[in-house]
Amino acid sequence: MTKNTHLVASVFRKEVLAMSAYKVADAQGLIKLDAMENPYDWPEDIKKDWLETLKDCPLNRYPDPEARQLVQTIRRLNRIPDQFDVLLGNGSDEIIQLLLMALPGTAGVLAPVPGFVMYKQLSDCLGLAFQGISLLPETFDLDLPAMLTFIGQHQPSVIFLAYPNNPTGNLFSETSIREVIEASQGLVVIDEAYAPFAGASFIDSLAQYDNLLIMRTVSKLGLAGLRLGYIVGNPRIIQQLNKIRLPYNINSLTQLSADFALSRKTLFDEQTQQICAERTVVLEQLDELDGITAYPSAANFILFRTADKKASDIFSSIKQQGVLIKDMSSQGGLLSDCLRVTIGKPEENRAFLAALKKSLSQS
Ligand SMILES: *Cc1c(COP(=O)(O)O)cnc(C)c1O
């Protein structure tokens, strides 16, 4: 054992030794409202067509390294002009990793906090200097003066802005984002993971800014199991990323399935509308509860604050009643006393609200 400890410490980078693995809660037997998944299944006839499509997939062959068919579908659906390139990733997580891997070791990475944890996690892992700048309390909007001061002094190589932001659910002010893009000499990645629920996007601003990249994923739309994300922007930037992308990072089944599903847009449009309608219902119900402050959301989840130091007890009580949400309170800062619930099916949301009410009456 001593030898092993020495072995591990001498072989691995100190950044890796200091990290902890990304933990995912076990949801077995629980109503799963913790991970921003779309709760809806596909109709049987669509499933049948899908399996028919997969039947002749040549699994003995390597996938198309460029995923040409799928890229074409993504371009068409998102009305991406020919002047921009599209790079696919095994989830947008992989694209964040790719981008950071391409930076020099001295590079700085900037993102508002609280934000999506992978920006920091992957920066830490690669030994890059990550700087989080706190959002404004309660509105969770960008602290523009603080952002601009930091950018002026340090000019980070990459700035990540999730739009809407996870875990707060809001859209940052558009004018603040534009000021950040204009002040930055590095890349600005607008992470539009929740675009289907937001009704807002910077995709039409790509032509205005050379340093702007738009990243999206099919995960929150309803295809989390496929692992597919994409980033769009200036070909000169995308070409660099393409050099370090593993040649077959999007497997054949994902290419076929994503192309199949995205081509049936109405299926997801209906599900997305349902989820947005339920988001309104859940927010109204949360607003009626004493001791709960719920924040408006442009995504498929809602962040809410409980009474002082009660978040973990309420989370556990809800879980004991069979519903898994996400406890954000351990992250502290603006998230102290906060929990996050993903919008599920109407009956799942009702079960969550009933469990929350019961836990409040007990505490
Ligand atoms: C979920 C999420 C992602 C990751 O999406 P994958 O494509 O599933 O890797 C990226 N950014 C934000 C802000 C997210 O919430």
Image (cartoon, helix red, strand yellow):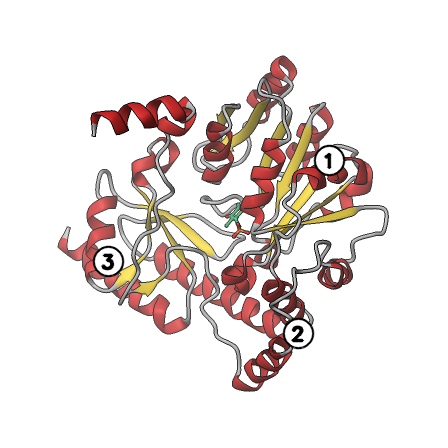
Is the residue under label 1 in contact with that under label 3 (CB below 8 Å)? Answer: no
User: Which residue lies under the disc numbered 3?
Assistant: 318
How many residues crowd around disc 2 within 10 Å: few (fewer than 14), some, or many (20 or more)?
few
Cα distance, mark 2 to mark 1?
32 Å
Q: In the current view of this chain or complex, which residue is farthest to the right?
A: 83
Q: Total marks drawn? A: 3
Q: Which residue is painted at 54% across and 56% down in the image? A: 227
According to the picture, the residue beneath numbered tag 1 turns out to be 240
Name the quadrant containing residue 181.
Answer: top right
Sequence order check, earlier mark of 3 and 1? 1
Q: What element carries label 1?
A: helix
When the figure is inspected, residue 31 is found, relative to residue 178, above or below; the finding is: below
Residue 81 location (% of width, % of height): 83, 52
Amino acid type of disc 3? Ile
Marked residue nearer the N-terminal end (3 or 2): 2
- What's the distance in space between the residues labelled 3 and 2, CA to CA? 36 Å
Instruction: Judge from the rendering whether residue 359 lies leftward or rightward of residue 161; answer left or right.
Output: left
Using a 10 Å C-alpha cutoff, classify the residue at mark 3 as few (fewer than 14 neighbours), some (14 to 19) or many (20 or more). Answer: many
Give the residue drawn at x 35%, y 35%.
Answer: 20
Q: Where is residue 298 in the image (x, y as percent from the top left)?
A: 54, 52
- Label 2 sits on residue: 264
